Image (spheres, rainbow, N blue to C red):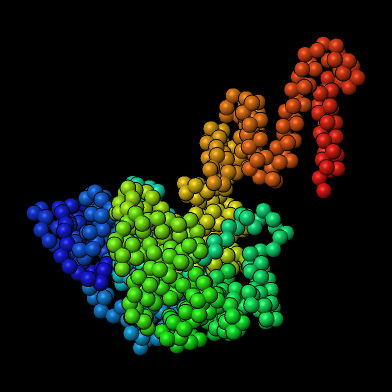
Amino acid sequence: MIRLASSTKNFFASSICVRGFGLGDIKVGSTQRKPAKSISGCSTDKSGKRQEVKVRLSSEYVMMAKLINIHEHVTCLLLSVMFATLGAAVTRQPQLVEPKKQILDKPKNSYEEPTSVREDLTPKVLLKTTFKFALEQLFLRPESFNVLHPLRKLAYDGDPGGHLYIGFMHSFGLGGLERSQAKALMHYTFAAIGGCEQAQMILAYRYHFGRSVSKNCEVALDLYRRVAKIVEDDRTQNSRSAFPLEKIRLSDESDDPSGPTTNQLDRDLLQYYQFLADKGDVKAQVGLGQLLFQGGRNVPRDHVRAFRYLSRATTAGDSNAMALLGKMYLEGSDAVAQSNATALKYFSMSAEKGNPYGQTGLAKMYRLGSGVPVDYSQALKLLKLAAEQGFLEAHVELGHMFYFGIGVEKSYPVAFKYFQQALMQGHTSAFYYLGLMNGQGTGVVRNCHNAVDLLKEVAERGPWMSFMQEAYKAYSEGRMNEALIRYMFVAELGSEVAQSNAAHVLTNTNPVLYSANASLALAIRFWQMAADQGSPAARLKLGDAYFYGYGVPADYNEALQYYRLAGEDNFRPSAQALFNLGLMHEHGQGVPADNHLARRYYHLAATASEDAQVPAQLALFKMALAEMIKRMRSLQWIETTMSGLLGDNWDLYMMAIFMVFLVILRSFVLP
């Protein structure tokens, strides 16, 4: 039998019967809709002999089928595809006697075996070793295609990670697998039911935007809520930063190829701070200590060095350093043992100096009763003092107290106010609780789409987003295949930046995973995904693609639509898109020629970006010059005189002279 989940419980199933697909008959459940324990059917082996096959399902699979509202016939179709896809995985009972032995006895030329696998490994350790090897093959050597066999083995053994990555490979046609969104969706669903957070994110993203499935906000909300809870719990329990890892957009760096990369800037900045800190600069010691304590900007955590710098700054009397040391002692770390008494000492020293960080830390100890008696009134007093100074953590703590009614009367509107203030500066907990409130309609009118957007942001701050940093490192070091695979995986999770970066790698480098035409088609797909999430840069790229027929049929109407979306964005209007709209209205491409609208778009482009001011002014000058020459042509004596002197193309000569004059004039005006 195929092991699809760890638990085997009764499940709801209806009478579904599928014929064809070369599988014989597959029947699910019974006509009376009674609980069933397996799916039975017939399969034909290579010799043509029909054998009965049973697939045991858990209640969670049916719950997911009900959750995503799959029609019964579609459910059965997916099950039949599962039989066809796994092929040899739908094996007979004797082949399951020694699963560990099977994978070890495979010929060496079938795939490159991990050297660490031994006969005496337990099944659990073997599964972990196989999974590690499969990931190494997928991300570090994607062109080798040696990953398929171990991942199929993992999926067959019911491992959610195996289903996740086979789904990923089907989604993009990797490893020799056919590109099939139906099969990808099937494997993602199995992985999500098995508790895989990345698969749940992928499904949530697809249901939110309707990619290969019908849009369903409620399903997306439920899945994002699960992942966001894990991220928030992990952040609060393990002292992770409340702010996301930096997401580097490759197109921003390519705009100035001569400039330093983000990694170079980070290294230079770190060296500069370290130089100042070693010289005794207290602010540099605090900044470097906090960076090493929390990690970020491509700097790994180093609590030992952080403790050293913060201790020196504390000796100099810095209240921020005192608060950070208090946090370090409160939570315990590699550098110091957990000590409520020492944490209380440092938080009190910091709070006495009016430091909001110290006030918030001390308030948290009073709220939780960590080393002191629980005192909600004192905690509330300290938090309000810190909030008045604009400290984000204080706003979140106050929101938390009013949301749960801890020491105060529960008030969702007050909690909403505090969370909203923290949200404006990007605090993860604020996104999480506001997402819950929008999804439940507590303290605010229920709005499923707002809730999904907020919880999606939290989910995209999980530890799996470290793939972005690893992808950028591979890109910086010229390992384009690895960079592409990693960006593609995070793009599948729903990250707009990763989608844009994957398209950038496909169109600006030479990865060998796809042909030129396939790379362009895939880049269009990623630009479309990013454009659906509101990226002006992706919308501009799609506008260019439709304008020039780049990977898609040329279509001025589509180009206009995407240029308008990119140029009229309320937050990040694209100056290039506005300029292109001016050109299209000036020359009547896709729309009737309209000089008034053309001038308007040129003016908007000049306002949107300083870099667009000179091109926009030149375009406006050219339009004015063309209109002047048009008037001159209407005067017969000027037409006759100029034609006699310069020929029939005298207007072109005049325009060229004026343009040269304007360029010379600008060279004197600009520094």
Residue 486 location in percent, x, y? 51, 64
Question: Residue at point 59% right, 84% down?
Answer: 315
Q: Residue at x 37, y 49 (%)?
A: 449
Residue 282 at least partly seen: yes
Residue 38 position by quadrant: bottom left
Q: Position of residue 366 (x, y in %)?
A: 37, 76
Report whether 57 appears left or right of 439.
Answer: left
Label count reads 0
In this view, the residue in front, 640 or 131, is 640
**Does residue 185 appear anywhere in the picture?**
no
Q: Position of residue 595 (x, y in %)?
A: 65, 26
- Please tell me in which quadrant of the rendered image residue 330 appears: bottom left
Q: Can you tell which quarter of the image residue 442 is in?
A: bottom left
Nearer the observer, 398 or 134? 398
Please give the name of the residue rendered at 23% of the width and 63% of the height, measured from the top-left corner.
60
Left-right relation of 118 to 510: left
* Rendered position, 110 above or below 310: above
Q: 614 above or below 590?
A: below
Quadrant in which the N terminus is drawn: bottom left
